[in-house]
Image (cartoon, grey):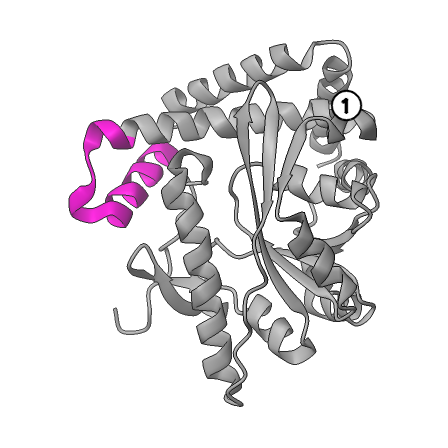
């Protein structure tokens, strides 16, 4: 393990070093090319992505369109991975000049209420950029992330993610730490678009039941925090648009399980809306419908 960890950390540091020398537009091109290569050689995840698209779009699915979406999906994730290396080295003023905002009044208003804020999104667009830039807006976040096996690489990546004032919460202690952050009137960011296995609740996603984390709903109902959807998309020439939607109404029927299910379904529908609008921006390579409801 020691040699493997050393190799991984050395590669990551080397890529960071290269990003300081190579112009950002060149890095974006390299990332896109690497993504295209991934589409060609990673047949397993290419098949998963195509299967997901067939399931999601059903009778509307067209094979040529599906291949186009998956190829551009690979290129997109290659591009934002390379771009993250470049963005980490840019000063705050330069970063702010690369982002256009929509709905800033929603997120500022949510923080102003002093009840804590729960922001949700998916593995869509450039979610790492959204989190980084919110720290620079003076509205720092606690980010939930699975710790890497490599401790040196984990520390290095955490320093980069936290440089705008954000804080990393490891999944091992996530719920307790998220509760503390909300009670301290801070923001917590959660992605809700991955298969949650047996820990999830089943809500519709593209018309099919998908196991989805109930954590967002549980925290919102328990704490009264404001729930804000946020998404980001590239808009060309290395620029991005970050969108904050109006706060989601949190149900309060008194039946906790029903309220959690209703809120989770509503928030998942918002993620689906964005994926339908920009399908190449979402991580189709993940087995979203891997877990089935009991009895199916």
Q: In this picture, is 131 found above or below 96?
A: below
Can residue 241 be seen? Answer: yes
Say whether residue 138 is left or right of residue 100. right
| Disc 1: which residue | 13
Q: Which of these two is toward me, 108 or 51?
A: 108
| Above or below for 282 versus 72 | below
Question: Which quarter of the rendering shows the C terminus?
Answer: bottom left
Residue at image coords 81%, 27%:
93
First to last magenta residue range? 44-66
The answer to whether residue 81 is above or below residue 259 is above
**At 78% from the left edge and 16% from the top edge, which residue is drawn?**
17
Residue 259 position within the rendered picture, expressed as x and y whole percent measured from the top left: 49, 80
- What SS does tag 1 mark? helix
Whether 37 is drawn above or below 171: the answer is above
Q: Describe residue 97's horizontal placement relative to residue 62 as left or right.
A: right
> Residue 282's quadrant in the figure?
top left
Q: Quadrant of the N terminus?
A: top right
Residue 43 in sight in this render: no
Position of residue 113 measured from the top left corner of the image (x, y, whole percent): 75, 68
Q: Depth check: 177 or 265 in front?
A: 265
Q: How crowded is mark 1: few (under 14 residues within 10 Å), some or many (20 or more)?
A: some
- Identified at 37% across, 55% down, the residue is 290
Give x and y (percent) for residue 197.
45, 63
Residue at the extreme left of the image, as rendered: 59
Examine the residues drawn in magenta and state their main secondary structure: helix
Which corner quadrant of the image does residue 48 belong to?
A: top left
């Amino acid at each position: 393990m020691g040699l493997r960890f050393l190799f991984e950390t050395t590669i990551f540091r080397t890529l960071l070093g290269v990003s300081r020398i190579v112009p950002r537009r060149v890095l974006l091109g390299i990332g896109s090319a690497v993504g295209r290569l991934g589409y060609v050689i990673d047949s397993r995840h290419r098949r998963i992505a195509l299967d997901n698209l067939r399931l999601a779009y059903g009778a509307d699915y067209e094979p040529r369109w599906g291949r186009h979406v998956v190829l551009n999906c690979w290129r997109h994730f290659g591009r934002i991975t390379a771009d993250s290396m470049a963005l980490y080295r840019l000063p705050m003023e330069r970063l702010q000049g690369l982002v256009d905002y929509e709905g800033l009044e929603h997120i500022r208003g949510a923080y102003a209420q002093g009840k804590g804020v729960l922001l949700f999104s998916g593995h869509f667009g450039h979610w790492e950029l959204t989190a980084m830039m919110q720290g620079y807006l003076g509205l720092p976040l606690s980010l939930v992330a699975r710790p890497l096996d490599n401790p040196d690489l984990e520390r290095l990546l955490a320093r980069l993610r936290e440089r705008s004032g954000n804080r990393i919460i490891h999944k091992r202690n996530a719920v307790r730490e998220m509760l503390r952050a909300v009670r301290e009137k801070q923001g917590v960011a959660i992605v809700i678009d991955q298969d949650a296995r047996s820990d999830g609740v089943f809500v519709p996603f593209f018309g099919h039941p998908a196991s989805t984390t109930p954590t967002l709903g549980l925290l919102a109902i328990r704490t009264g925090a404001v729930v804000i959807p946020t998404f980001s998309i590239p808009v060309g020439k290395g620029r991005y648009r970050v969108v904050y939607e109006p706060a989601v109404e949190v149900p309060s029927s008194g039946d906790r399980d029903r309220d959690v299910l209703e809120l989770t379904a509503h928030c998942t529908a918002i993620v689906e809306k964005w994926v339908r609008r920009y399908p190449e921006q979402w991580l189709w390579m993940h087995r979203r419908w891997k877990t089935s409801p009991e009895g199916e």
